[in-house]
Image (spheres, helix red, strand yellow):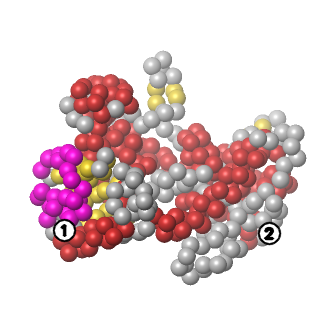
């Protein structure tokens, strides 16, 4: 199996043959559609950024969506006949893999390379002898060769109309949109811990503070039947609690954490944050079903392989909570510890993934406890 990367732009396609280390710039789109790519053979894999292989809307002129639905079906058929495996790379991940590749390829001039990328293709070509398109193709190939788990998670290409794609995703848009409004409204009022009296989420947190603490801490060393992987204090920290020594009690300190996590289960009106279903789903038409963790994890908290933009809940968790709760530390130019704004090298990236996964597991533990209280036991 050989790996090929295709990047579409300005009405042409750029192709990188990773096995032979050959880059083919600005090829006609027909080469991609007909899979007439040099050196490609049955059983080889072709990776294309997922956004490029959604159908162009009728009358649309977007160069990012060069094919209409009939052309996508032809591409799909050609791949089937020729035995080429077509898989999709998430567009939201391109910047990360580019940065990792630049850090390794241009160790001593990484900052200059990063600045050149920002200034555009012409500047990067002048300084580093390759286009930004070639840079991206090489970066994706390198990443997938080093990350077999990421490769396994890539979606397979299936032709879909843009309107069908949007209809299929509408249940997610509605779910995330309502949560955005709820959390943004609470944020402007200090999440109900300032002068504003709050809503059902805040009321639950205030009324049940002691019960939440007790359930997350458990019986400690005496709870011999517990299968928890984390100490109670770690879980309380995720939920924004702080231990006050004088009174020997836990109180909410980072209100955004507590509100965000509970808001994934409960709405400000005191209802469960239920989900709807896409057309064709066996539960289509059902509007009062509480989702499983897998759905909440992917769409409320935005924890998913394809890092599409998610909502405020995802931003609160991934950009703030997960970063501050991880143990990944870098040393700045003054010798002080700091949380990294970006991952400095591939080894640090692997460490970051490990730390990120630990925090995600803590979130799941906390969520299960709160879900049992709110959904299973009806506590408000």
**364 lies above or below 10:** below
Residue 311 seen anywhere in this rendered image of the structure: yes
Q: For mark 2, give the secondary structure.
A: loop
Q: Quadrant of the C terminus?
A: bottom right
Residue at 70%, 61% in the rendered image: 265
**Residue 246 as seen in the image, left or right of residue 223:** right
Instruction: Assess whether residue 113 is covered by the magenta stretch.
Output: no
Q: Nearer the viewer, residue 77 or 101?
A: 77
Q: Nearer the viewer, mark 1 or mark 2?
A: 1
Q: How many marks?
A: 2
Residue at the front extreme of this rendering: 59
**336 lies above or below 161:** above
**x%, y% of residue 242?**
73, 40
**x%, y% of residue 83?**
20, 71
Q: Residues at badges 1 and 2 in contact (C-beta under 8 Å)?
A: no
Alpha carbon separation for disc pair 1 and 2: 53 Å
Residue at the bottom extreme of this rendering: 282
**Residue 38 as seen in the image, left or right of residue 269:** left
Q: Which residue lies under the disc numbered 2?
A: 378
Q: Earlier in the sequence, mark 1 or mark 2?
A: 1
**x%, y% of residue 168?**
52, 69
Instruction: Assess whether residue 29 is covered by the magenta stretch.
Output: yes
Residue at the top extreme of this rendering: 334
Residue at 51%, 22% in the rendered image: 336
Residue at 43%, 67% in the rendered image: 161
**Residue 225 as seen in the image, left or right of residue 263:** left
**x%, y% of residue 77?**
26, 73
Can you tell which mark lies on residue 356?
none
Residue 67 placement: quadrant: bottom left
| Region in magenta | 20-41
Q: Which residue lies under the disc numbered 1?
A: 43
């Amino acid at each position: 199996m050989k790996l090929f990367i295709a990047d579409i732009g300005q009405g042409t396609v750029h192709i990188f043959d990773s096995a032979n280390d050959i880059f083919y710039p600005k090829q006609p789109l027909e080469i991609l559609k007909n899979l007439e790519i040099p050196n490609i053979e049955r059983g080889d894999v072709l990776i294309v950024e997922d956004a490029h292989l959604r159908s162009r809307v009728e009358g649309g002129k977007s160069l990012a969506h060069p094919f209409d639905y009939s052309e996508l079906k032809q591409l799909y058929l050609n791949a089937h006949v020729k035995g080429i495996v077509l898989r999709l790379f998430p567009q939201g991940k391109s910047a990360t893999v580019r940065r990792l590749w630049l850090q390794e390829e241009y160790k001593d001039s990484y900052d200059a390379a990063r600045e050149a990328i920002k200034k555009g293709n012409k500047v990067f070509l002048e300084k580093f002898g390759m286009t930004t398109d070639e840079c991206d193709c090489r970066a994706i190939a390198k990443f997938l060769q080093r990350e077999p788990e990421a490769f396994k998670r890539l979606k397979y290409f299936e032709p879909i109309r843009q309107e069908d794609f949007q209809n299929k995703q509408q249940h997610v848009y509605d779910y995330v949109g309502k949560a955005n409004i709820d959390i943004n409204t609470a944020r402007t009022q200090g999440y109900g811990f300032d002068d504003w009296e709050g809503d059902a989420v805040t009321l639950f947190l205030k009324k049940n503070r002691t019960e939440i603490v007790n359930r997350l801490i458990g019986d400690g060393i005496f709870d011999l039947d517990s299968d928890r992987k984390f100490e109670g204090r770690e879980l309380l920290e995720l939920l924004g609690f702080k231990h006050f020594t004088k009174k020997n009690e836990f109180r909410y300190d980072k209100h955004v954490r507590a509100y965000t996590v509970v808001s994934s289960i409960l709405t400000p009106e005191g209802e469960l944050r239920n989900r709807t279903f896409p057309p064709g789903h066996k539960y289509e038409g059902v509007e009062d079903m509480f989702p499983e963790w897998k759905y909440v994890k992917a769409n409320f908290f935005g924890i998913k392989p394809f890092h599409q933009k998610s909502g405020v809940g995802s931003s609160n968790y991934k950009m703030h909570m997960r970063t501050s709760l991880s143990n990944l530390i870098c040393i700045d130019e003054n010798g002080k510890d700091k949380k990294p704004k970006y991952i400095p090298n591939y080894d640090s990236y692997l460490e970051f993934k490990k730390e990120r996964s630990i925090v995600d597991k803590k979130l799941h533990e906390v969520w299960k406890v709160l879900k049992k209280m709110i959904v299973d036991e009806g506590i408000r």
